[in-house]
Image: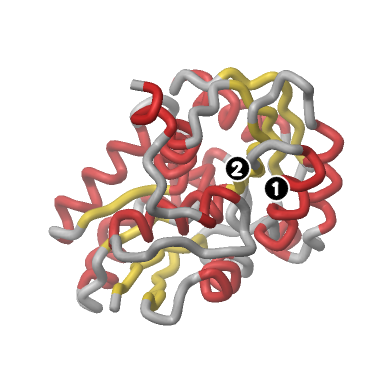
Amino acid sequence: MGRIGLLVPSSNTTVEPEFYRALPPEVTLHTARLFLTKISPDSILGMVRDLEAQSKNLATADVDVIVLGATAPSFLKGLGYDRELIALIEKATGKRATTTSTALIQSLEHLGVGRVVLGAAYDDKVNAIAKSFLEANGIKVLAAEGLGLVDNLVVGRLDVSTAYDLARKIDHPDAEAIVLACTNWKTMNVIAQLERELGKPVISTTQATIWAALRMIGGISGIPGYGRLLNDLAAPSRKTQLA
């Protein structure tokens, strides 16, 4: 039995259902909410102010790992900001922690990916910050396009077809993978189909977050149906294989 503590933006209506569907029965999910209604830099900074208190609340459920399951809040201030948030959570709770942005970078490294295209639900301002974060971590972003949304409830009501359509639109022959960013954007149910059609990994931030949390807990061999990243959780990283 494993327990994941998930910190969720308060208006996020997608990440919990997508976690519940993908997690194996021996792993349970426990959540706390951080106030957020708009995906904008000021609102995101406000959300993070409650991070320590809500992390402490989650720790009382004796979770194995605490995850900040929000993409933009964990890359907002650029390179290393995700690590600062991890350190804050771990110091406050004594629990291991990670963030969605950390998980995204680790998953790309795991797959040996250095060139991507980026699709997101965000407006141009937040999408540019996402692109900069990836590139600061050594990932070349060949193209980036967002849906232009700021209202987080609107994002959560989007059909999963919007992720499928944007991924097909932004794919580039030189891209080694497609990144779909925003944990409130439904993505999980189109990942496997996109990988079959495009012949390359598709990494969504929700998928990467689940992957990272389960790797930290250990003991899970794989979860079928959500792309190659989750299909073989026990696989060594491409970086290790190439070393």
Task: Identify the amino acid type marked 2.
Answer: Ser
Q: Residue at x 76, y 65 (%)?
A: 157
Q: Is residue 5 left or right of residue 138?
A: left
Near mark 2 (Cα within 10 A), the count class, few <14, some 14-19 or many ≥20, is many
Q: Residue at x 33, y 49 (%)?
A: 98
Is residue 21 positioned above or below 182 on the image? Answer: below
For the residue pair 74 and 174, the one nearer the viewer reads as 174
Q: Residue furthest bottom?
A: 25
Q: Residue at x 72, y 57 (%)?
A: 155
Quick check: marks 2 and 1 in contact, CB under 8 Å?
A: yes
The quarter holding residue 51 reads bottom left
Q: Which residue is mark 1?
A: 150
- Specify which label sits upstream in the sequence, 2 or 1: 2
Task: Identify the amino acid type marked 1.
Answer: Val
Q: Residue furthest front?
A: 241
- Residue 108 position, x and y percent, is 50, 34
Is residue 223 positioned above or below 126 on the image? Answer: below
- Residue 145 position, x and y percent, is 76, 32
For the residue pair 242 and 30, the one nearer the viewer reads as 242
Near mark 1 (Cα within 10 A), the count class, few <14, some 14-19 or many ≥20, is some
Quadrant location of the C terminus in the rendered image: top left
Q: Which residue is mark 2?
A: 40
- Residue 41 position, x and y percent, is 54, 38
